C-alpha cells in the first residue's frame, strides 16, 4: 500500500534548555512495579521513590501531564512545515497490564519536527485523559510515541496526544475490538494485528498545542516534545469500557495526576487564532 504524507504546522523556535539522560527513555514494561491507586505505596505520589532512576517522577521540573489553559498559551501562526510520514507496518497488540498498546515492527514511518526524524514506535490509550484543556478532563487519550535513535539529540522522544469525548465509535478501535477482547486481563498477552496503517488513526490537525514535558509513566523521562491536538475526537462508551476491562484492576483509570506547569512555555499554533 502506498504511503501517505500528512502536513502538520509546528512551531519552529522551540527552545530546549535542559540536558536529558536517555538511558531509561523507554516506558516501564512490567506493570507490577507501579500502579495508579492514589493511596498505594506504588501509586503516582511515590513513583519517584520506588527506584533511583525514577527520581524525576517526584523531583522533575518538566513533568507531564499538565492542564493546557488557552489564557496562558502563546498563539503562533503556522511558520514551518513539519511532516508526518506514516506507512503500513506489521503490528501486534499487547496487554501490558497498565495499558493496551500497539507496537509496530520493521518501521511504520516517522514524525519529522524541524527536520529531525522521530520514527513511530507504538501507541497506547489512557482513560480518562491525562492532559486537561482549560480544566476539562476528557474520556480518553491516545499517545503515539516516537523515538529517535540519534545519540546527538537532547530530545529523542516526541509524543502526539489525541483527546476523545464520548460519542460515535472511534474507527481504529472498532477494527481491533475483537483483538482487545482476546487479551482481557492477561499481562503480556499479545494479539497479532497484521499489517496496520498508522494513518488510519488520522492524527492530522490544523491546530494543536506544543510544550516540553515528560513520559507520563516511570521513569518519567523529561525532554519529551509533546504535540497535543486541539481537535477532540469521539469514542464510544463501549470502547472505553473494553479498554478498562482489558487492563488490571489498579489501572482501570490509568491517568497520571496533573503535574505542575513550572512556568513552562505553552504554544497553540495553526491557521489564525479562532476556535
Image (spheres, grey):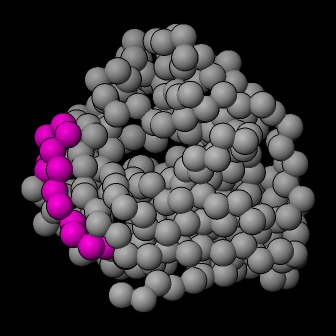
| Quarter of the image with the C terminus in it | bottom right
**View extreme (bottom): residue:** 2
| Residue extent of the magenta highlight | 183-196
Q: Give yes or no for residue 191 being in the magenta stretch.
A: yes
Q: Is residue 121 visible?
A: yes
Residue 239, how many percent across, how many down?
27, 64
Residue 225, how many percent across, how many down?
68, 50
Q: Is residue 138 visible?
A: no
**View extreme (left): residue:** 182
Whether residue 169 sits left or right of residue 79 in the image: it is left
Quadrant of the rendered structure where residue 32 is?
Answer: top left
Quadrant of the rendered structure where residue 267 is?
Answer: bottom right
Q: State the residue at coordinates (58%, 47%).
A: 149
| Quarter of the image with the N terminus in it | bottom left
Q: Is residue 62 above or below residue 33?
A: below
Whether residue 262 sits left or right of residue 40 in the image: it is right
Amino acid at each position: 500500500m502506498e504511503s501517505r504524507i500528512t502536513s502538520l504546522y509546528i512551531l519552529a523556535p522551540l527552545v530546549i534548555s535542559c540536558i536529558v539522560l536517555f538511558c531509561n527513555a523507554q516506558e516501564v514494561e512490567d506493570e507490577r512495579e507501579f500502579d495508579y491507586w492514589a493511596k498505594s505505596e506504588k501509586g503516582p505520589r511515590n513513583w519517584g521513590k520506588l527506584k533511583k532512576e525514577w527520581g524525576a517522577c517526584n523531583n522533575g521540573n518538566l513533568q507531564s501531564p499538565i492542564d493546557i489553559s488557552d489564557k496562558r498559551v502563546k498563539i503562533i501562526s503556522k511558520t514551518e512545515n513539519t511532516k508526518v510520514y506514516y506507512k503500513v507496518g506489521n503490528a501486534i497488540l499487547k496487554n501490558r497490564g497498565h495499558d493496551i498498546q500497539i507496537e509496530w515492527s520493521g518501521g511504520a514511518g516517522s514524525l519529522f519536527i524541524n527536520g529531525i526524524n522521530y520514527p513511530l514506535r507504538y501507541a497506547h490509550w489512557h482513560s480518562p485523559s491525562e492532559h486537561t484543556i482549560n480544566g476539562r478532563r476528557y474520556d480518553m487519550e491516545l499517545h503515539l510515541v516516537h523515538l529517535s535513535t540519534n545519540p546527538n539529540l537532547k530530545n529523542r522522544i516526541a509524543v502526539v496526544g489525541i483527546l476523545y469525548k464520548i460519542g460515535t465509535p472511534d474507527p481504529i478501535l472498532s477494527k481491533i475490538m475483537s483483538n482487545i477482547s482476546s487479551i482481557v486481563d492477561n499481562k503480556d498477552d499479545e494479539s497479532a494485528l497484521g499489517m496496520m496503517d498508522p494513518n488510519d488513526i488520522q492524527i492530522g490537525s490544523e491546530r494543536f498545542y506544543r510544550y516540553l514535558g515528560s513520559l507520563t509513566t516511570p521513569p518519567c523521562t523529561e525532554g519529551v516534545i509533546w504535540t497535543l491536538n486541539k481537535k477532540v475526537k469521539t469514542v464510544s462508551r463501549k470502547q472505553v469500557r473494553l479498554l478498562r476491562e482489558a487492563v488490571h484492576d489498579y489501572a482501570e483509570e490509568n491517568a497520571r495526576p496533573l503535574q505542575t506547569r513550572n512556568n513552562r512555555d505553552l504554544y497553540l499554533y495553526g491557521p489564525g487564532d479562532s476556535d
